[in-house]
Amino acid sequence: MQRQDVDLRERRRGTLFVFIAAVLYSIGGLCIKVIPWNGMSINSARNIVALLVVGGYLLLSRHRLRFNRWIALGTISVCGTNVLFSLANKLTTAANTIVLQFTAPIFVILLGILFWKKRPEKLDIAACVLVLLGVVCFFVDSLEAGEMLGNVLALISGLTYAGVFLLNDMPDADPISSVFWGDTLSVALGFPFLLQETVFTPAALASAVVLGAFQVGLAYVLMCIGLRTTPAVTASLISGIEPVLNPILVAVFYHERIGLLSMVGAAVVVVSVVVYNVLRSRRGALTA
């Protein structure tokens, strides 16, 4: 009985960490909009700060930094997600960016079909079709708003984000090491752009520090810890707060407008992914 109480507390703590991480992720759109730099510059600057946070965690937890082929793939996924998210936020609305990135669970299904030959169920196919319809709404809306490139990059970031989730279960993977190396690669790729920036206002510098310390560094650390005791389905449901909170913060503080079709697309994508995960979790509970 005592052991069950300990396990329950651990699960609750893990769930809380995932929730806090999702809230921290949601401030990304607002802070990026405030900084008058190139997307690559922003990503490099925030990851310099993030490396201090992640590196500090590795030292305090005495976690040995590792590298192998699976961690290398995780590194590419983390770096790709970081870079594409920053670039997309400069080229399209924060709402479009975060919701299109939220297509990651659908990419997990598709990658499983392509590389692991997992036969899709009717529920998987239905979810893919609905999310695809939602994504189409974004791209129809972007034809008039001139945000096509930003939407394309945001959608690709959903693919790289899916890679991060998939590699958590790969043999000999180490998520926190992938985060460290992914942040390091992000710094290196964007540093030449950062050196060309000339506007270093207090607001820009403060936003870059907040992004690096909280939206990237601390959020990744909390997510890695939380996923140890939180089922992936539960974590994905909790993370659903991000595509809702992110555009709200930008709309309130930055007065960014969201197109009608994009709002419809956002509703279709978020509801489809959440309902899909709920139905999958119920089916898993019945077969357990």
Image (spheres, rainbow, N blue to C red):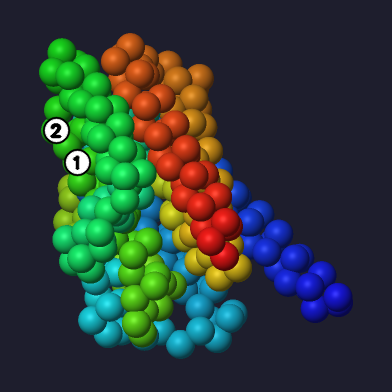
Give the Cα distance between marks 1 and 2.
Answer: 6 Å
Q: Is residue 105 visible?
A: yes
Looking at the picture, does residue 231 appear above or below residue 86?
Answer: below
Q: Residue at x 40, y 78 (%)?
A: 174
Where residue 149 is drawn, which disc sits there?
Answer: 2
Query: What residue lies at 35% left-to-right and 18% top-to-bottom?
Result: 264
Q: Quadrant of residue 65?
A: bottom left
Q: Is residue 117 left or right of residue 25?
A: left
Q: Secondary structure at mark 2?
A: helix
Residues packed near mark 1 inside 10 Å, few (<14), some (14 to 19) or many (20 plus): many
**Viewer-nearest residue: 97 or 46:** 97
Q: Do the residues under discs 1 and 2 have CB atoms within 8 angstroms?
A: yes
Residue ID at (43%, 42%): 276
Q: Position of residue 170 (x, y in %)?
A: 34, 76
**Residue 26 left/right relative to 7:** left
Determine whether 244 is above or below 86 in the image.
above
- Where residue 94 sits in the image (x, y, percent)? 35, 30
Residue under numbered circle 1: 153
Q: What residue occupies the far front of the structure in this picture?
A: 287
- Residue 235 visible in the displayed image: no
Amino acid on which disc 1 is placed: Leu
Quarter placement of the N terminus: bottom right
